[in-house]
Image (cartoon, helix red, strand yellow):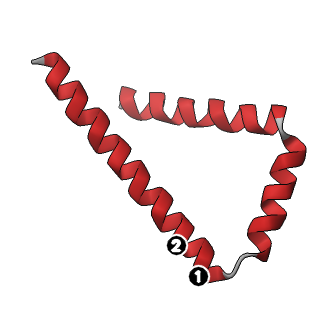
Amino acid sequence: MTTLLMAAGVVLVFEGLIFALLPKRLDDLAAFLAQMPVDARRHLGLLALAFGVLLLWLARAIGAKVRV
């Protein structure tokens, strides 16, 4: 449960930084994404999902090696 809370905290910190430091760029990104075809957004989302799973797997693999 602690890991889940830490992960949620990290996500909120990065999202907060983006909203605080780059609000205009965030508006531009939202407009760009709105113009993309639905299939392209779906593929982008699946790519981000796969990359996130890969990062979690890698972090767990490295963490397991460090503890041994």
19 sits left or right of 54 in the view: right
Residue at the image position 73 percent from the left and 31 percent from the top: 17
Q: Which residue lies furthest to the top in this view?
A: 67
The image quadrant where one finds the N terminus is: top left
Under mark 2, the amino acid is: His
Quarter where residue 35 is shown? bottom right
Question: Which residue carries the number 1 mark?
Answer: 39
Decide: is 68 above or below 7: above
Q: Where is residue 12 in the image (x, y as percent from the top left)?
A: 63, 35
* Residue picked out by circle 2: 43
Q: Which residue is drawn at 79% across and 66% down?
A: 32
Q: Residues within 10 Å of mark 2 (few under 14, many from 20)?
A: few
Indicate which disc residue 25 carries.
none
> Where residue 16 sits in the image (x, y, percent)?
72, 34
Q: Where is residue 3 in the image (x, y as percent from the top left)?
A: 37, 29
Marks 2 and 1 in Cβ contact (< 8 Å): yes
The amino acid on which the numbered mark 1 sits, given as a three-letter code, is Asp
Relative to 48, residue 36 above or below: below
Rendered location of residue 6, percent (x, y): 46, 27
Q: Count of labels shown? A: 2
